[in-house]
Amino acid sequence: MTFIDSSRVKTLEDAIQRFEKGNTPTLPPRVGGGYPIWYTFRLHNASEDTKWDLYFKDRLLSTPNYIYVYYQNESMHSGVDFAQNGFYLPFSQRQNAEDYKRITLDLVPGETYRVYVKAVNIHQSPLPTSINLEQHKTWSDTFLKQQARKGLEEGILQGMIWIFIMYNVVLSIMSREKIHLYYGLYLFFAGLYFLYRSGYLQYFPPFRYQPELINYMWTTSLLAPAFFILFIRKFLFVKKNFPTLDIALKYIAWLAIGIYILESIIYTITENTSLLNQINTYSFVAAVVGIMLCFLLPIKMRNPLVYYFMFGSLTLSFAAITGVFTENYYLTKIGLMIQVVTFTVGMGHRIRENEKQKNKAQASYISQLKENEKMQRDAKRELEARVQERTAKIEKQKEELLAQTDKLKEANAKVQYQSQLLTEKNLKIVDSINYAQRMQEALLPDLSKIALTLPNTFVFFKPKDIVSGDFYWYHAKDGKSFLAAVDCTGHGVPGAFMSLIGYNLLDRFVKHENYSMPGEILDQMQIGVQQVLNHTTTNRRDGMDMGICMIDHRENKLYFAGAKNPLYYIQNNQLGVLKGEKQSIGENTRKGHSFPTHILDLNESTTIYMASDGYQDQFGGPEKRKFLRKHLKQVLHSIHHLPIEDQSLLLEDRLSKWMEMGREAQIDDVLVIGCKVS
């Protein structure tokens, strides 16, 4: 018979009276609510064994918290024997220190006993309403074997964990990198949690004497995933490759650590383990979600480190899930050991790669220094040789030189000329780039040529460096005017090289191969760029964003196609947009893809604009942010009614003021083309 002690204060005498009244309804298999449960039954020892064990078979680690057993021989009318056990009893007060769920009864063979059992959980975890009985020697034989195997497993796991913890502590001190500290802390809290789950933590002080302190330890299940997330941020260079995801992971990790501190404070004040369990469960799920976000990284990363991460994490996840469904805790331990070994090997790979990059950079720097020193020595030696030569001649012809002042000045001028050779050599590089600028400017169409068919046209062109990756292109034939604004990959010298490729390809397809529809021209540009840059075999992503329009003066229509870049037009004071495709020229695309041609009727007075992304991406303003496309559209709408030459000046003035307010330098080439078409 069983009943729930809802008052929590019933004594043995009270319980006996309750059982004698017979008011003991049948209870379900498990009862929660934190109330004690009383059990009573008659036990007859029909065997020759004197020691029998009562035990609770429950998978919860700390259930029951306390067990009190009273039993009396019915025939001898002797006193009541008493025994106690339970997870929250100190070892000195437990009848069986090794197995806190078990009570051993001394029963005389052939005698019958009345047994009363009181089981208590001080928290809300449910209690089983049934008790099991077995011979003590059966438990003793199997328990020792199980403990030996279990101790060996846990010893191997903890030994491995602590070896790697000390290894990472040493690395953290030597390298001063936080990654080793985070990994060591992850291993520490994972090992601590496994000690708790295996039950071995209760054998260590102070838990041996105050078992209730272990409630501060099971919540450390939050700290292991928290430091694992911080470790993965460093291990996979998340901050460098995915800055937004890095911020999210950092907040999740530190939030989990903060919640652990809050849980410890809540338990100290309230000792409410039910509330603690709810908070810890939800927080642990959030931390696991953070770890699952890390599985998105290998999708975009091409780094050998992701294979170590994927193998180690998936192995532990598979082992843990399998262990839960098969109730085989040993699998989770094996998964953790494999993960620890995998990540340690991955850390070694990471250290080697960092060392290679460091040595390569040092070698390059030393080589450059040696080359500079050699150039300085050669120049100094040459200069000294010439000075010595002139000095010897001066000493030899001292008397003659005194009479020939003009010759002396000439000799001194030659010496000074030699000292300037180094300066002139340094200027040659700049001169070469300036010459390249003149060559690039010579390629660009003159505005006077554009004005022959498009008289109301301006070009605001502001390269970031001396040469530019942006360029504009124009051609007219058969009553049609072609106008393009092109933004090549990069800026400076690399961008200028790309601009030469783009310019020549446009000349080829329009002037020589007579393509006239903008969509067809972009299709040919796509093929041409991939052939020139060999994209099909090298998988490079160099290319260009561009917009090109063809104005048919006879039909009074505009045809446009764009690769990422749009065309803005204003008719009847309303701004419209002809959007470009979301693809750059040079990108590998699906088979059969082509660029569409958009058509705009020019029967009404129309102002069109094409631009690279340099204007809208420029940082500045009081908040040091980008100018943005929406503000560029507002500026274009506000100036479209002005004379075309004034529009270019206003665009330049607005950009300069934007950069001055934010004290920002120009970050990219800037190109804006405007044209009034009637």
Image (spheres, helix red, strand yellow):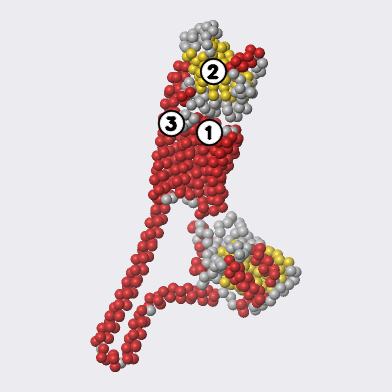
- The picture places residue 145, in percent across and down from the top left corner, at 43, 23
Residue under numbered circle 1: 215
Q: Mark 3 and mark 1: span between their CA atoms?
A: 24 Å
Q: At label 3, which amino acid type do we have?
A: Glu
Label drawn at residue 373:
none
Residue under numbered circle 2: 69
Of the residues under marks 2 and 1, which one precedes in the sequence? 2
Residue ID at (47%, 45%): 182
Q: At label 1, which amino acid type do we have?
A: Asn
Viewer-closest of 486 and 91: 91
Residue ID at (40%, 50%): 175
Bin the neighbour count of mark 1 within 10 Å (Cα to Cα): few under 14, some 14-19, many 20 and up: some
Callout 2 secondary element: strand
Q: At label 2, which amino acid type do we have?
A: Val
Query: Residue 423: which quarter of the image?
Result: bottom left
Q: Mark 2 and mark 3: span between their CA atoms?
A: 34 Å
Q: Is residue 396 above or below residue 3?
A: below
Q: Mark 2 and mark 1: span between their CA atoms?
A: 25 Å
Label drawn at residue 153:
3
Specify whether 413 is left or right of 288: left
Residue ID at (64%, 63%): 629
Mark in the foreground, 3 or 1: 1
Q: Is residue 358 above or below residue 573?
A: above
On the question of residue 590 being in view, the answer is yes
- The picture places residue 673, in percent across and down from the top left corner, at 63, 71
- The picture places residue 59, in percent across and down from the top left corner, at 54, 27
